[in-house]
Image: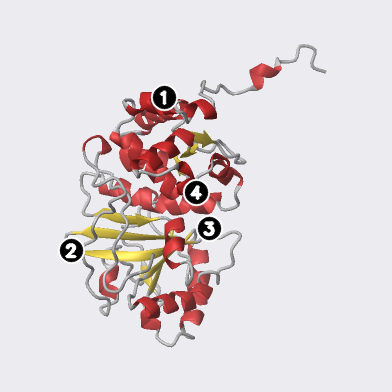
């Protein structure tokens, strides 16, 4: 029996003092906050509005020189109610801190675009609600796909950079009546440029034919818009990738024009540990490449050569409502852009 129990307050983790939600949304507070926020802070607020949740490591990959430097600034943004955070439970070890947009950050994003917070469809309860969502792992994983590309583009020997990153929500607003990709992106190197829709497969709750069932929807999108956009499928293991590829092959055989829906797959365990999270490496296997042992895999930008029928991409202008090219305090991290797709309009 415990005869000298620890005080209850000693069991609580330290929480930095923060303003109340009401105080953090007043005009006086926003005026005082204006001279404290750097362009990178405001850019990060917009990133979290667009992509919902990012971990400390992902934020450091985007625009900070180290995780320690990111943590120091994130603590200030948390205290100022620009960002909020939570730490999910995991069975072993501890999960990284996860950040979402807080009330003051939402007001900053809204005011920059001349809007009210209600026009952003933002609610703090909804933003924090992702902590309990069954989609948390999926959302963080899909975001990690793109932050890994940004991290790669910031390295000294980088050959390319991420020029476009659309979130699942933005894709749904533009294409949701036909298909709902997990994300859309573009990667550019001196040798060429490649665009894709991402299907991020966690390999747990969802059956391997989930993506395969969407091929008909992607075919309908390509037929409607006149634009053929490849689909990249990220699987967690080689075994899962093999099962997904079998399901994709069966679904592709039922399409009227399979060339309208080019697909390539990869797995997180295919490459070395140092390259595991780098989607730009030679890890992609197009579906029309047979499952022969030792089949050569392609780098991300090389996938454009796997489907010669794809037309050349055109230049993508920056979104006028988002922060422009990352410069100065934003380091080399490219902020998200809203592309004006080539050819016919994608809608929205």
Q: Is residue 259 left or right of residue 210?
A: left
**Which numbered disc covers residue 246?**
none
Vertical order, 127 against 34 (above or below): below
Q: Is residue 268 visible?
A: no
**What residue did someone put label 4 on?**
121
The residue located at (35%, 53%) in the rendering is: 278
Residue at image point 23% right, 68% down = 313
Q: Position of residue 331 (x, y in %)?
A: 25, 39
Residue at 30%, 74% in the rendered image: 344
Disc 3 element? loop
Image location of residue 239, percent across then percent down: 52, 65
The label shown at residue 191 is: 2
Where's residue 253, x and y in %? 47, 85
**Residue to which mark 1 is pinned:** 28
Mark 2 or 1, which is nearer the eye? 1
- Helix, strand or loop at label 1? It is helix
Name the foreground residue: 114 vs 166.
Answer: 114
Cα distance between the residues tagged 4 and 2: 41 Å
Q: CA distance from mark 1 to mark 4?
A: 23 Å
Q: Which mark is residue 202?
A: 3
Q: Is residue 256 above or below residue 159?
A: below
Task: Give left or right: position of 125 versus 340.
Answer: right
């Amino acid at each position: 029996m415990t005869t000298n129990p620890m005080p209850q307050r000693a069991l609580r983790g330290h929480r930095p003092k923060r303003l109340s939600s009401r105080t953090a949304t007043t005009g006086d507070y926003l005026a005082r906050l204006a001279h404290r926020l750097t362009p990178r802070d405001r850019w990060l607020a917009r990133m979290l509005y667009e992509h919902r949740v990012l971990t400390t490591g992902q934020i450091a990959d985007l625009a900070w020189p180290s995780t320690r430097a990111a943590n120091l600034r994130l603590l200030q943004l948390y205290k100022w109610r620009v960002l909020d955070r939570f730490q999910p439970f995991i069975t072993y070890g501890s999960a990284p801190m996860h950040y979402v947009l807080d009330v003051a950050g939402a007001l900053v994003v809204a005011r920059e675009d001349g809007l009210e917070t209600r026009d952003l469809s933002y609610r703090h309860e909804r933003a924090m609600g992702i902590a309990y969502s069954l989609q948390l792992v999926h959302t963080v994983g899909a975001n990690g796909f793109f932050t890994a590309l940004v991290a790669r583009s910031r390295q000294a020997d980088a050959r390319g950079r991420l020029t476009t990153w659309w979130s699942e929500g933005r894709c749904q607003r533009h294409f949701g009546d036909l298909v709902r990709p997990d994300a859309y992106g573009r990667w550019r190197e001196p040798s060429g440029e490649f665009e894709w829709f991402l299907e991020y497969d966690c390999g747990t709750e969802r059956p391997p034919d989930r993506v395969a069932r969407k091929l008909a929807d992607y075919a309908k999108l390509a037929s409607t818009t006149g634009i053929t956009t490849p689909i990249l499928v990220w699987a967690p293991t080689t075994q899962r990738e093999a099962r997904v590829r079998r399901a994709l092959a069966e679904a592709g055989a039922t399409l009227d024009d399979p060339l309208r829906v080019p697909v390539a797959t990869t797995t997180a365990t295919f490459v070395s540990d140092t390259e595991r999270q780098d989607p730009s490496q030679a890890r992609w296997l197009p579906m029309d490449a047979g499952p022969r042992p030792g089949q050569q895999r392609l780098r991300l930008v090389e996938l454009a050569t796997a489907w010669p029928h794809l037309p050349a991409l055109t230049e993508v202008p920056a979104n006028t409502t988002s922060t422009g090219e990352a410069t100065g305090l934003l380091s080399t991290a490219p902020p998200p852009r809203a592309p004006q797709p080539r050819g016919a309009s994608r809608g929205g």
